[in-house]
Every structure is written in structure tokens, then in C-alpha cells.
Image (cartoon, helix red, strand yellow):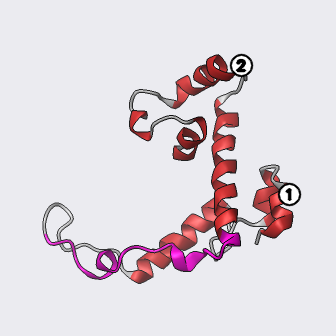
């Protein structure tokens, strides 16, 4: 959903004022394109996968999907989450689940199947996993 905000040029901080239900009308009045919610979400998903494929082509991968050392090794000192932290092992598990949900390889690269399903055949030819 956040990628959709980026794609249409909407401020992410306005998401509490502009709900997904209003996006089709906003797009129609701004561009004349008549789209439903599913089409708009697909546009956001396409943009996100294009960016991820570009980054993969430039050498980014799972090794870059990490958190700062402090968040992985130092417990939170106080507050409702006091004593908690995300271990490197937990992060690896979360990445596995996230990549699977996205349809990406376990290296965090969009698969050719995923790219083709989004009509991004040209990008799939260039280097999907």
C-alpha cells in the first residue's frame, strides 16, 4: 500500500485522510484513468518489484535486508517492550516468511514467475531469480 502512495505521488503521512477507498476516484479525476482497488494495488506491487529487481541487479540481496546491530543484540532498555530484541535468527526467519509472501527467492530477489505474473516480462528476462 505504501508503494501505491509513492507511485501516485501522495504523501504517506496523509494516509489517515486518504483511504484506499478514495484512491480510484482521485486517480480518475487527476488522470482520466478508471481503475479499481485491485488494479491500483497491482500498480504498487509492480513498482515495488521493479525497484527490488533494480536493486538486485546492482548487487543488493538478503545480506542488505538487516537491522542495525543494536536492534539485533541489545535489549530495549525500558518501556512496554523492555528487555525485547530481535535476534539475528528471528530476523532470518522473518525474512524467509516475507520473501515467500512476496514471491521472491530466499535471496530476496523477485522470481521470474513473480515478475511475469505482474506483466514485467522484460525485467524477468533481465534477471529475475
Label for residue 5?
none
Image coordinates of residue 65 in percent, x first then y, are: 51, 72
Image coordinates of residue 87 in percent, x first then y, are: 36, 80
Q: Earlier in the sequence, mark 1 or mark 2?
A: 2
Image quadrant assignment for residue 70: bottom left
Q: Is residue 63 above or below residue 22?
A: below
Q: Is residue 85 above or below residue 27?
A: below
Is 22 colored magenta in this rendering? no
Quarter of the image with the C terminus in it: bottom right
Instruction: Give the residue drawn at x 71%, y 19%.
Output: 32
Farthest residue toward the left?
Answer: 78
Dot 2 crowding, Cα within 10 Å, few <14, some 14–19, many 20+: few
* Start-end of magenta stretch: 56-77
Instruction: Give the residue drawn at x 54%, y 26%.
Output: 21
Q: How many marks?
A: 2
Residue 45 versus residue 33: which sits nearer the camera? 33
Dot 1 crowding, Cα within 10 Å, few <14, some 14–19, many 20+: few
Q: Is residue 34 above or below residue 101?
A: above
Say left or right for 125 vs 37. Answer: right
Residue at numbered disc 2: 32
Say left or right for 49 vs 14. Answer: right
Farthest residue toward the front?
Answer: 58
Image coordinates of residue 103 in percent, x first then y, are: 68, 62
Instruction: Give the residue drawn at x 14%, y 62%.
Output: 79
Quarter of the image with the N terminus in it: top right
Q: Secondary structure at mark 1?
A: helix
Residue 99 versus residue 48: which sits nearer the camera? 48
Residue 14 versus residue 77: which sits nearer the camera? 14
Q: Secondary structure at mark 2?
A: loop
Label for residue 122?
1
Amino acid at each position: 500500500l505504501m508503494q501505491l502512495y509513492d507511485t501516485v505521488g501522495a504523501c504517506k503521512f496523509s494516509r489517515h485522510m486518504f483511504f484506499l477507498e478514495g484512491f480510484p476516484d482521485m486517480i480518475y479525476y487527476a488522470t482520466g484513468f478508471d481503475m479499481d482497488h485491485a488494479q491500483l494495488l497491482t500498480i504498487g506491487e509492480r513498482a515495488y518489484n521493479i525497484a527490488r529487481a533494480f536493486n538486485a541487479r546492482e548487487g543488493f540481496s538478503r545480506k542488505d535486508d538487516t537491522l542495525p546491530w543494536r536492534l539485533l543484540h541489545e535489549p530495549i532498555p525500558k518501556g512496554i517492550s523492555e528487555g525485547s530484541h530481535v535476534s539475528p535468527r528471528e530476523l532470518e526467519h522473518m525474512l524467509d516468511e516475507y520473501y515467500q509472501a512476496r514471491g521472491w527467492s530466499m535471496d530476496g530477489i523477485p522470481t521470474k514467475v513473480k515478475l511475469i505474473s505482474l506483466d514485467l516480462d522484460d525485467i524477468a528476462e533481465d534477471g529475475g531469480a
